[in-house]
Amino acid sequence: MANEMTGPRRRAIPRRRWIAVAVAVGALIGAYVGVQVAARTSAERSATLLDLSPALITSGGPPPAQDADRAIQSELLYLNSSGFARSVARAAGNPAGSSFSAAQVGATDVLQLVAVAPNGPQAQALATAAVPLYAAHRKAALNGQITGLQPQLAAARKDLADAQAQANAQAQAAAVANAQAATQAALVGASPPPLVTPTNDLTVFQNRVNALQSQVDSVQATLNSPAVGGTVVQSAHDAGASRTMSPTIAGGAGLAVGALLGLLLAAVPLPGSRRVWTEEDGPDLGVSVLQPPLPVARPDWLQDLPARRSDDPVEAAARLLAARVAGSLAEGRPLVLVGAGPGVGTSFTAVNLATALARRRRTVLVPLGDVADGQVAGWFGARPDGAGLLDAARASSVEKVEGALLTTSVQQLYLLTVARDGRWEPVEEALAGQALPQLLASGWTVVVDCPPADLSTASFELRSLRPVTGVVAALGRTASDRLSRTVEQLPKDEKAELAIVLNRMPRRGPFRPPRKGKA
């Protein structure tokens, strides 16, 4: 009766539900604020594509590829100098908050002149103004070359004239001597003596003059060419301008920041919360921290993987991480990546590091985690049929092991697959077989994508190969105690290098990998 009089009791919102509500509200507010801020404050970017091939021709023809690359790098030093940036800004009216930079497009002679300004017209004006300023610089440099060659040419001409005068004098002296000898012979009735012939050779002096004159003419021709400062492949006006941060990206960033703030507001009061591991905790575990962390990838990152640009954030980070372990791998040791728990992005890290290594040498990726979900093989469109590692472990030669490899969309990157199964033991036994030692002995680079250390003994099976071991942790998510337990569970080997690879989880998205067959 008392309950009926006082009415139904109000149910308190559970703590987890409250956290979810706070995160959702914060994410929505953050996304709205991010879109608005991007629309009002984001700068705009414009670029001019400039082909330097004509500007590099200063000696009668294109320079060798190696010399051309050095010339390109030299020009980039000038284009990225603060003095040139100030000149470009002055020519465009000194827009506030502007910047200018230049970069080589792949391995070509084409440069991308990039300008950033508060609005599109100003960015286009900066990128456009850079072209005539660079042409003026090139003209001054070529004039300097001509100025330096002129004294050499004048000296060579003087040497030629002196040699010619000396030859003429010797010819006159020889003529007099021959006449006197003939007269003397006639007086005594003897036969005329042999004629005296001058031996002066002016070829060396003439060749020197011709070579210097050719250089002067070549540089002068380049100086007089309309393309002395390069050829505009695409103007900034034609390319247009785009915002440095799109509203979509800004909204996503705002959503993430808002969600994080909502999570902090809801979760900070919770007592006894687990502390998230940070890079500063590395010395406490006695391990080194590999930098930089792999950043978030676009949903279609796998489609861009084969020909991904070097300045792509994920590609650049993967290349730097791979370079830091390449020396140890060159000693015939595999790279073994172990996740500090499920869902931290170990496979994502393994694929990107293996791709960076495959840019330089033949690389095999062994996705052991595919026993559980077949994720990596699915990314590359491969369908393990029970062969792969299980068959290769019993192979008697490296040729038979290589026959079990599957090609991928990335050049020089191969998969040694495992079939999905409910048990790890056959794969772990195969991992300790002859497949990986034979590949390593034949000069292959091997990257092993291991399951978490508390699920499989894979990392112990590889101990005899002195692996370079990396523990993959999700930045801002992996708890300190979880990471500590993972490191403690790994086999201890004083010759093995242990490092932490901090990874930010990739965004999920549809994958449409190309079909691939046998290697």
Image: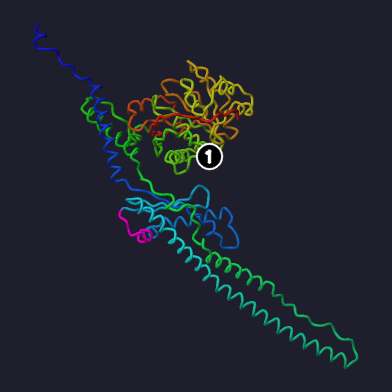
Q: In this view, does 216 lie above or below 134?
A: below
| Amino acid type, mark 1 | Arg
Residue 164 lies in what quarter of the image? bottom right
Instruction: Tell me where residue 8 appears, x and y as whole percent.
Output: 14, 12
Q: How many labels does the image show?
A: 1
The residue at which mark 1 appears reads as 359
Instruction: Tell me where residue 134 appears, x and y as whole percent.
Output: 45, 60
Q: Residue at x 11, y 12 (%)?
A: 7
The residue range painted magenta reads 86-96
Q: Which residue lies furthest to the top in this view?
A: 1
Instruction: Tell me where residue 289 appears, x and y as whole percent.
Output: 39, 36
Instruction: Tell me where residue 23 appears, x and y as whole percent.
Output: 26, 28
Q: Which residue is drawn at 58% across and 63% down?
A: 59
- Residue 85 or residue 247, whichever sits in front: 247
Q: Label 1, secondary structure: give it.
A: loop
Q: Residue at x 32, y 51 (%)?
A: 118
- Residue 174 or residue 148, whichever sits in front: 148
